[in-house]
Amino acid sequence: MQDLFFELLRVSIGQLDCLSRGPSAEEWEKIYQTSRRHGVAGVCYKGIVRLFEFGLRVPQDLSLDWMADAEDLREEQELYESRCDKLMKKLAERKIRAAVVNGLGMRHHADNELQHLLRATSIDVYVDCSMDRLIKFARQTGQEEIQSGYTSMPLQVWENTPVNLYYRLMTARNPFVNKKIQKWFVQNKDLMFSLNDNEIFVPTLTMNAVCMLQIFKQLLLSGKATMGFLVDYFYVLRQLQGAFQPFKDGSGIENTLKTLGLTQFAAGVMWVLQKALALDRQCMLCEPSEEEGRFVLRCLMARKRSLRRLLLHYPMEMMWPKR
């Protein structure tokens, strides 16, 4: 069933024309539930529509549920996008430099027909300002209780739309690795501010290629990683086509991954992207590693995080508490 799920994803994003075989009604139900769990139900519905041309039909009741999910998602994401625009204008009015990151920040890289079917679970914005200034901004929006962590501060602007303001976008549990990451990020933070077609700041493609990898690693260690995140990452890497720009110290992508301790993990993620989404080799950060990739894929698709498995594979990360 997992292979059929990946095939449907490839059909949805235009990397495959048709499934290798027609799933049974039970298999369709499992694929549907998997797509919902991984935040790609909307993307997969686009694949369902494309499969009609080949005579492959989802059971009618399930098809209607799937279509309803896709329409609900489209409305939700349009609302998120509208509210994100309003938030960015408020930040700009107060001269706070900010960039949209994660789901909403990746959307413009995808094909037009899929942009509102990619699921962002919150509005995530990186802000380049002091904590005092950020707290002042939150109070100006009417927020009385301020709660902040090591990486971000929730902004309670809308009741049904989570908002996170990030002052640290990349982190690692290992304090020694984290120190290197924070130093590297400060040196390169200007790459977080590239204007997109809507005149909103987003990270450059090369900056996203590194930031998203580290974010995905932390999500995997926390048991929160999804295929939805990798679909976003696929579009970033596909648009880059391997044309990575040097960073502020002149380092290329290979040396940067080594500096940040991401070389092995990157090789595994490239293998997963190749297997699940058929990412071309020329778009990859590095040579894929099947051994590392199979481990990443096993953790990604597991219904429950295995602390023992992660501790044995990433001991220098898992021995430290989550930030």
Image: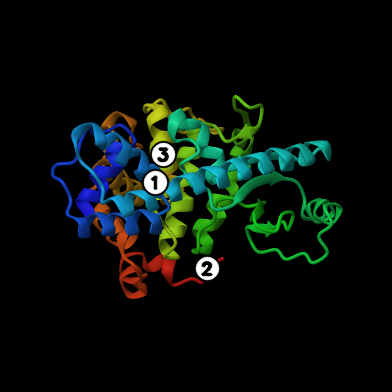
Q: Which of the numbered marks, if any, corresponds to residue 230?
A: 1
Chain-order first, disc 3 or disc 2: 3
Q: Circle 3 — which element?
A: helix
Q: At x 64% / y 46%, what residue is drawn?
A: 125
201 w.r.t. 124: above or below:
above
Q: Could one spot residue 271 in this view of the protein? A: no
Circle 3: is it few (<14), some (14-19), or many (20+) Cα within 10 Å?
few
Q: At x 48% / y 35%, what residue is drawn?
A: 115
Q: Circle 2 — which element?
A: loop
Q: Find residue 233 and report its image quarter.
A: top left
Q: Where is residue 186 in the image (x, y as percent from the top left)?
A: 63, 44
Q: Position of residue 203 (x, y in %)?
A: 57, 36
Which sits in the foreground, 25 or 42? 25
Disc 3 and disc 1: Cα gap in Å? Answer: 23 Å
Which sits in the foreground, 73 or 298? 73
Q: Could one spot residue 2 in this view of the protein? A: yes
Circle 1: is it few (<14), some (14-19), or many (20+) Cα within 10 Å?
many
Q: Which of the numbered marks, if any, corresponds to residue 125?
A: none
Q: Name the quarter where the C terminus is drawn.
A: bottom right
323 w.r.t. 273: above or below:
below
